[in-house]
Amino acid sequence: MTSNPNRNPENRRRFPMGSWNDFNDAQSNTNLIPKGTLAKVHLTIRPGGFDDASQGWTGGYATRGSTGAVYLNGEFTVTEGQYARRKIFTLIGLYSPKGPDWTNMGRSLVRGMLNSARGISDKDMSPEAQAARRISGFADLDGIEFIARIDIGTDASGDDKNEIRSAVTPDHRDYAQVMGAAPSLGQQSPAANTAPSPQPAAAPMPGRPAWAQ
């Protein structure tokens, strides 16, 4: 008859009961950051090689999907705190043949990112603030750091995944604490160009964009 190694006192000291006998206290492998978490993130745009100069999409940053949708393939890395180095992958919509909703969502997110990164209140419509919300190209977004509100959506398989749909601006009470040294307009050097200022965007809609299924 085979003896139980855990009956040996020496083995119990070396290999505590519970570790490999009872898995109730093992960490759950959900790997999701809780919905609503605020985190400072760094954006890396994964280039897709699609350009359309008439839209201002240059530098090879945009990606065109098989459905004809165009988007920025965003890799957001949490830079500090409990979830430091965790990566969140989110598509920033530029165009969808199904309608303007995803374009508006993408523009709304980028506006929030610029407000957050450059320390601008969303209500600030001064000339300085409007200039700070303009970019010379997508290269200005590649590498930007801002405060994101972590959300939960679904991937193509229907499984839960973290997403970023909105940014936290200085209007939020926790902005300064999460951002650290909050930037000010006087420290910014936003690109002054003739790009049109963003128009009010539609409110974000839940779920994964239809064109990304």
Image: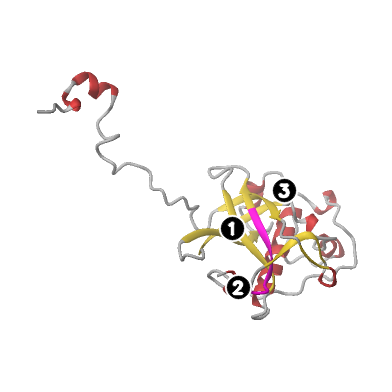
Q: Which residues are magenta?
A: 67-75
Three-letter amino acid code at the position of disc 2: Trp
- SS at circle 3: loop
**In the rendered image, which residue does mark 1 sit on?**
149
Labels 2 and 3 touching (C-beta < 8 A): no
The residue identified by callout 3 is 182
Residue wearing tag 2: 211
Q: Quadrant of the C terminus?
A: bottom right
Distance, label 2 to label 3, CA atoms, is: 36 Å
Of the residues tagged 1 and 2, which is closer to the observer? 2
Residue 46 placement (x, y as % from top left): 69, 55
The image quarter containing residue 100 is bottom right
Q: Position of residue 141 (x, y in %)?
A: 75, 56
Is 151 on the left-hand or right-hand side of 148? left
Establish if 41 lies above or below 67: above
Q: Residue at x 64, y 74 (%)?
A: 67
